[in-house]
Amino acid sequence: MSSEYAIEARGLSKHFGSLKAVNQLDLKVPRGQIYGFLGPNGSGKSTTIRMLCGLLTPTEGTATVLDTEVPGDSRDLKPKIGYMTQKFSLFGDMTVFENLQFISEIYSYPKSGRIGRIDELLEKYDLTQQRRQMAGTMSGGQKQRLALACAVLHGPDLLLLDEPTSAVDPQSRRDFWSNLFRLAERGTTILVSTHYMDEAERCHRLAILDRGIKVADGTPRDLQASTGMRVIEVIADDPYAAQAVIHDLAEVASVTQLGVRLRVLIPEHHDNALQIVERALSAAGVDAQSSLSSATLEDVFVAVTMGPEERIA
């Protein structure tokens, strides 16, 4: 009987000498959902994905991926997964059609259906006009669509995407995510790493990684509701002056400037957080409007990745 989870990791760790790239990661990814890894470069996202697909052997811990133990029977797992890396890794000196044909041979796709499957993917990912074009001459968005087409050609149950939209324009990113939602609706489980907050908000669930450690896990809405912080938004004519005043307050855990706005995080045990900010700005003669605000994913990220000493201010 298949588990309700496509991925279950228990104490998964990977050390490179003294560097703990991934440290005691526990993970459960439900089938048929888009699950996100959110974190900066060096947080362990890529290392985790490579362990889950059998490219890296864990230092400690185990994982079950599509009911297959990792490390262990990774050879049996590979036909069930698709993997797309951040860097375009197909053949630039081959045409779009030749790349897809080559991938179909690697996965031993039935010969009788190969051409039909390739034509289907060219149509689905808007690559029909690029059929005979050399892959190396295509735009970033076109390369991205080709890489996704190659990753799903064999109909994998699990799709692993390692920062797949880092080198494309916003419109290509939106189109790419529309394709991911269609795949998930048909039952494909998708694990995608990203450092874009707007992409993380699109995921059904996500984990936030920081220096190899999972510091948060849940739906975007649940994470936004449980930061442990009160969020105050400040709009000031002179945001630099306002930030200088707020930064020096003992109660403030974080203050971030976004244009003319400031996002201020104060631990929730301070019931009068708004008044603390307003009094300080008024005493300093800084003209500003302050109000309580709902947490964004960026607020969540700041809150869960700050040190313990900052959270207890």
Image (spheres, rainbow, N blue to C red):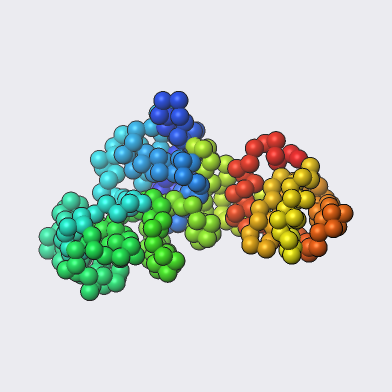
Considering only vertical position in the picture, is 48 above or below 93? above
149 left or right of 241? Answer: left
Among the 4 quarters of the image, the one containing residue 235: bottom right
Q: Residue at x 74, y 50 (%)?
A: 244
Query: Which corner quadrant holds the C terminus?
Result: top right
Q: Residue at x 53, y 57 (%)?
A: 197
Q: Picture coordinates of residue 272 (x, y %)?
A: 84, 52
Which one is nearer the viewer's eye here, 230 or 11? 230
Q: Picture coordinates of residue 289 (x, y %)?
A: 78, 64
Q: Picture coordinates of residue 124 (x, y %)?
A: 29, 70
Q: Residue at x 29, y 44 (%)?
A: 77
49 left or right of 289? Answer: left
Residue 226, visible in the rendered structure: no
Considering only vertical position in the picture, is 98 above or below 244? below
Which one is nearer the viewer's eye here, 68 or 170? 170
Among the 4 quarters of the image, the one containing residue 170: bottom left
Q: Picture coordinates of residue 196 (x, y %)?
A: 50, 56
Residue 132, visible in the rendered structure: yes
- Residue furthest left in the image: 112
58 left or right of 272? Answer: left
Which one is nearer the viewer's eye here, 173 or 206? 173
Among the 4 quarters of the image, the one containing residue 72: top left
Counting the numbered discs, the total is 0
